[in-house]
Image: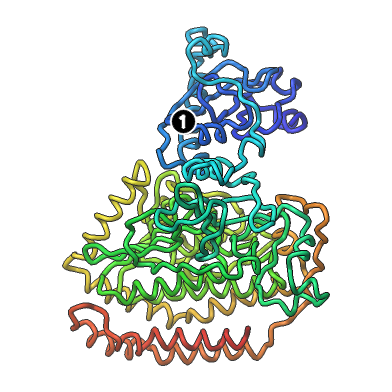
């Protein structure tokens, strides 16, 4: 801090997320404003943790001037906001209302400085001692695991939910499940399943359902606490001395890696029943659901709320299946909603790290993402809308561009780049989708500079089509009205025809298969080539900069070259697809299809989409 302040000599320093005190050498020379995520008078490092745990109905952000005592300086601004009765996670609260209030407070403080109001004496920051005469905040100690501990025989479902969400996404709540010490994350209330408190009742899509005294709680993610080799004591295969090659489990619990709960507990869950829930099951009770589909007024809504926006191979495949189902329905518009906190952040680096072969799992994951994007791009029966309610990054940001129209909330932050992950090149057809939206020069700038992109700027450059909504609810309502108008518009069929012809023209210029082949050639080198940069960056990301004690550093994967014959086959097949899907052939198909009332003719699919899809899938299945 001292070196940076001396080097830049700023007029003002703003600390938006301070973990240690600003040195006196800095704050004595330069005014320093600290963003504290608490109401007036609140002090301490666990403000949000206590607010959620104590069921506060309102909370806030205070802008303080740095002082010798932590969080004890004069107050420059303070903003409060309501907290939902259904508690948010700590990270979700920080990304949402806390960020909004912090922006307002920082801008207010800067304005006072710029106008000279503070220097002239016309206004002065409020001393903490004066605020304490009426403020409800107080000094609180750091929250320890003893404060977070769950007593399954006494704590209600609501209490358990609050404890877990107050520690999510860090540090988690330490508990014992089936004899394994784990940190718990991703808590969801369950209304219908019942069982003994602390007992695991069911599993679904990687999550486990644990009984409570008045109901049950779903826990979506766990992190093993102990040395990663200690699980050998409860692994029947390991006890025999045999290697992991005989194990049927995809993943092994790794200390320090947050994973889907069923992956961490693995064979310990033998006998625990699966409780699947169809994606279109009525939303008539509280439970854990990653993917939900519903319909209204000729519009299908597909939401996918994956923890922290990460999408594993399996999750990509399930979402692709869900999208294909949505596309088969007698609707006209499909709205992709992602999650409320995150739209998507692309491939699942934690699951990749915990796999037996991270390079190969990376390859499977990116191909599963590509398969999903391919389906969306080649949807000729519906108008597809991406409604970005939460932040998106890397391949998740590119996923949104596969839709025909893209809308975002004003406070959404996008990171449409990959390079920060060890010079990862990226796929998801970004070399086709991004330049179409923003132009070649801007696409290169976005992917090379690796800077965050605000929603307003994204609108200015064409990354999104519009930005609206004061909050998630108003965004969803306006998005719904737009989708309904689009589905019932007189020009709907002409829009579909225009979309189909545009896709044919694009493919005639350069088939989608070529984009995918070129991207994956670079990704293969990232995953299997001699440069370990991606693998090293991934491990730093997963382990937050350092490996836990006792965990050995994996050797770089052996270099594997992609067979040149595979690339030649891909290019040859893509050319054949383009030839068979010529504009003339497409026009003959579309003219017959356009006569159909519901705008969903199988003839169109046979003429072009299915051909392209099956050819690419066959080739890449063979390549894998």
Q: Position of residue 76 (x, y in %)?
A: 53, 19
Give the colour scheme of this rendering: rainbow
User: 360 or 115, which is in the foreground?
Assistant: 360
Q: Position of residue 449 (x, y in %)?
A: 61, 54
Asked where in the image residue 565 lies, by quadrant, the reply is bottom right
User: Against 515, is 281 above or below?
Assistant: above
User: Against 465, is 129 above or below?
Assistant: above
User: Against 441, is 321 above or below?
Assistant: below
User: Which residue sits at x=62%, y=55%?
Assistant: 222
The C terminus appears in which quarter of the rendering? Answer: bottom right
Q: Position of residue 28 (x, y in %)?
A: 71, 17
Q: How many callouts does the rendering have?
A: 1
User: In the displayed structure, does residue 398 sit left or right of residue 277?
Assistant: right
User: 535 or 455, which is in the foreground?
Assistant: 535
Query: From this viewpoint, which residue is outermost toward the top?
Result: 121
Asked where in the image residue 260 lies, by quadrant, the reply is bottom right
User: In the displayed structure, does residue 543 sit left or right of residue 313?
Assistant: right
User: In the displayed structure, does residue 61 sit left or right of residue 496?
Assistant: right
User: Against 588, is 207 above or below?
Assistant: above
The N terminus appears in which quarter of the rendering? Answer: top right
Tell me the residue that label 1 is attached to.
Answer: 56
Q: Residues within 10 Å of mark 1 (few under 14, many from 20)?
A: some
User: Which residue sits at x=59%, y=64%?
Assistant: 262
Q: Position of residue 398 (x, y in %)?
A: 50, 63
User: 53 or 92, which is in the foreground?
Assistant: 53
User: Which residue sits at x=61%, y=32%?
Assistant: 46
User: 224 or 323, which is in the foreground?
Assistant: 224
Does residue 211 appear in this view? yes
């Amino acid at each position: 801090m001292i070196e940076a302040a001396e080097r830049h000599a700023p007029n003002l320093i703003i600390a938006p997320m301070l973990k240690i005190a600003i040195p006196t050498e800095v704050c004595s020379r330069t005014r320093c404003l600290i963003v504290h995520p608490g109401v007036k008078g609140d002090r301490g490092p666990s403000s949000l943790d206590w607010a959620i745990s104590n069921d506060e109905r309102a909370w806030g952000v205070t802008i303080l001037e740095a002082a010798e005592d932590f969080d004890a300086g004069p107050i420059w601004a303070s903003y409060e906001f309501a907290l939902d009765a259904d508690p948010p996670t700590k990270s979700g609260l920080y990304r949402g209302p806390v960020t909004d209030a912090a922006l307002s407070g920082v801008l207010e403080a800067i304005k006072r400085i710029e106008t000279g109001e503070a220097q002239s004496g016309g206004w002065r920051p409020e001393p903490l001692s004066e605020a304490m005469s009426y403020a409800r905040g107080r000094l609180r100690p750091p929250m320890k695991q003893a404060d977070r501990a769950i007593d399954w025989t006494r704590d209600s479902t609501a209490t358990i939910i609050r404890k877990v969400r107050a520690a999510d996404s860090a540090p988690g709540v330490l508990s014992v499940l089936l004899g394994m010490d784990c940190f718990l994350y991703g808590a969801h209330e369950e209304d219908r399943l019942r069982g003994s408190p602390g007992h695991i009742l069911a599993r679904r899509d990687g999550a486990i359902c644990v009984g409570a005294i008045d109901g049950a709680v779903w826990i979506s993610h766990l992190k093993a606490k102990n040395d990663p080799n200690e699980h050998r004591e409860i692994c029947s295969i390991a006890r025999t001395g045999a290697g992991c090659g005989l194990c049927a489990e995809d993943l092994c619990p790794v200390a320090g890696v947050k994973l889907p709960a069923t992956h961490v507990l693995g064979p310990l869950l033998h006998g625990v029943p699966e409780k699947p829930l169809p994606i279109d099951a009525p939303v008539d009770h509280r439970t854990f659901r990653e993917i939900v589909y519903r319909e209204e007024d000729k519009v299908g809504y597909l939401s996918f709320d994956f923890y922290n926006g990460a999408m594993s191979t399996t999750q990509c495949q399930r979402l692709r299946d869900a999208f294909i189902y949505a596309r088969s329905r007698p609707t006209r518009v499909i709205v992709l909603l992602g999650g409320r906190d995150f739209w998507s952040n692309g491939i699942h680096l934690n699951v990749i790290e915990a796999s037996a072969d991270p390079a190969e799992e990376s390859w499977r994951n990116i191909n599963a993402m590509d398969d999903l994007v391919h389906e969306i791009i080649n949807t000729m029966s519906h108008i597809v809308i991406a409604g970005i309610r939460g932040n998106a990054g890397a391949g998740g940001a590119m996923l949104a561009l596969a839709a025909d129209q893209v809308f975002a909330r004003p406070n959404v932050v996008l990171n449409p780049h990959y390079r920060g992950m060890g010079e990862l090149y990226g796929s998801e057809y970004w070399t086709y989708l991004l330049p179409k939206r923003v132009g070649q020069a801007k696409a290169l700038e976005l992917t090379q500079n690796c800077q965050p992109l605000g929603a307003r700027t994204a609108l200015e450059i064409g990354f999104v089509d519009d930005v609206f909504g004061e909050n998630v609810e108003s965004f969803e309502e306006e998005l719904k009205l737009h989708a309904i108008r689009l589905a019932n518009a007189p020009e709907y069929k002409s829009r579909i025809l225009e979309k189909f012809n545009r896709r044919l023209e694009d493919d005639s210029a350069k088939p989608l298969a070529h984009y995918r082949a070129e991207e994956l050639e670079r990704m293969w080198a990232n995953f299997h080539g001699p440069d370990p940069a991606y693998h090293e960056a991934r491990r730093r990301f997963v382990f937050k900069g350092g490996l836990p004690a006792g965990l050995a550093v994996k050797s770089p994967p052996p270099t594997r070259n992609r067979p040149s014959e595979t690339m030649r086959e891909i290019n040859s097949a893509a050319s054949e697809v383009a030839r068979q899907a010529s504009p003339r052939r497409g026009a003959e198909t579309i003219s017959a299809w356009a006569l159909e009332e519901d705008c969903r003719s199988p003839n169109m699919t046979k003429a072009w989409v299915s051909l392209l899809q099956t050819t690419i899938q066959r080739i890449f299945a063979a390549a894998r």
